Image (tube, rainbow, N blue to C red):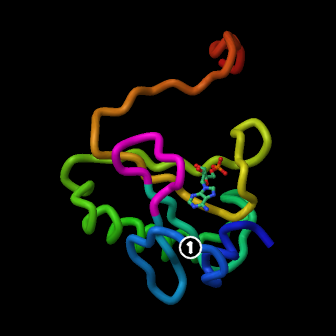
Amino acid sequence: MTIFTKIINGEIPSNKVFENDNFLAFHDINPKAPIHILIIPKKEVKDFQSADAKLIGEMTLFIHEVAKLMGLDKSGYRLIANNGKDSGQEVAHLHFHMLGGSKLAWPHLVDDTDTKKFF
Ligand code: AMP
């Protein structure tokens, strides 16, 4: 069981934004932008790679609602799903980070890896 399951079950508190029967959106405890929301399925799915199309389809509609609620549908936002070891995924429960509320930079690499080597 991950910390997100405990949040879903109400065993530990969260700053909720929106929820329905299948999904929950809450503020990240360590925000990387003025608005940093985590969006998770209530069903336990360990990462994006394990998710099926039905779940992602339903989650997409939920994410659209969260964006509208926060006004980010107009101003823009970034959606990130860290997946597995290289991404730095810390919590093994599928989640999208929704970042917005300001202009965002675009840094990714932790070192000087040659970004051309796969082309
Ligand atoms: P990731 O590295 O993609 O697995 O992201 C996990 C995210 O969960 C991080 O941004 C953490 O700040 C966030 N996080 C961890 N514990 C909590 C919590 N109790 N409430 C809200 N966000 C959390």
Q: Is residue 81 above or below residue 11?
A: above
**Three-letter amino acid code of the residue under disc 1:** Pro
Say which of 111 and 3 sits in front.
Answer: 3
Q: Which residues are magenta?
A: 27-36
- Residue at 70 percent across and 49 percent down: it is 83
User: Residue 72's quadrant in the figure?
Assistant: bottom left
- Residue at 70 percent across and 20 percent down: it is 118
For ligand 1, the image quadrant comes to bottom right
Q: In x, y percent, where is residue 59?
A: 49, 71
Which residue position holds label 1? 13
Q: Is residue 116 above or below residue 47?
A: above
Q: In x, y percent, where is residue 38?
A: 51, 60
**Quick one: SS at disc 1?**
loop
Q: Main secondary structure of the magenta part?
A: loop
Residue occupying the far left of the picture: 74
Quick check: is 38 in the magenta stretch?
Answer: no
